[in-house]
Image: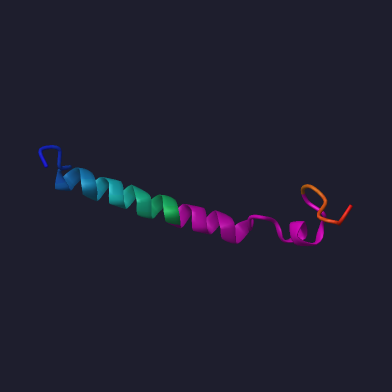
Amino acid sequence: MDARPKPDTTGRTTKALALNSAHLARLLVEQPYPPPEAHSAAVGPSREPG
């Protein structure tokens, strides 16, 4: 209880989190992950029975 964050620190951190989340959302709209072509391509180890 002695180490509670100051409201100013909490506010700055929350603002940074919101800005970073919005930035990531914009990047993912422009370039989805995984890329759409990865769904149809064989990616990673084969899952065919051996």
Q: Is residue 24 left or right of residue 14?
A: right
Name the residue: 15% across, 42% down: 4
State the extent of the magenta-drawn residues as a range: 22-43
Q: Is residue 47 left or right of residue 5?
A: right
Nearest the eye: 22 or 43: 43
Report the predominant secondary structure element of the magenta stretch.
Answer: helix
- Return the x and y of residue 46 as percentages of the image width and height: 83, 51
Name the residue: 75% across, 61% down: 39
Q: Let me know if residue 18 is in the magenta part.
A: no
Residue 21: quadrant of the picture:
bottom left
Nearest the eye: 22 or 46: 46
Q: Quadrant of the N terminus?
A: top left
Name the residue: 79% across, 47% down: 45
Q: Is residue 34 left or right of residue 7?
A: right
Q: Let me know if residue 26 is in the magenta part.
A: yes
- Return the x and y of residue 5 as percentages of the image width and height: 17, 42
Q: Is residue 43 left or right of residue 32?
A: right
Residue furthest to the front in view is: 50
Nearest the eye: 48 or 10: 48
- Return the x and y of residue 31 as percentages of the image width and height: 64, 56
Nearest the eye: 42 or 11: 42
Q: How many marks?
A: 0
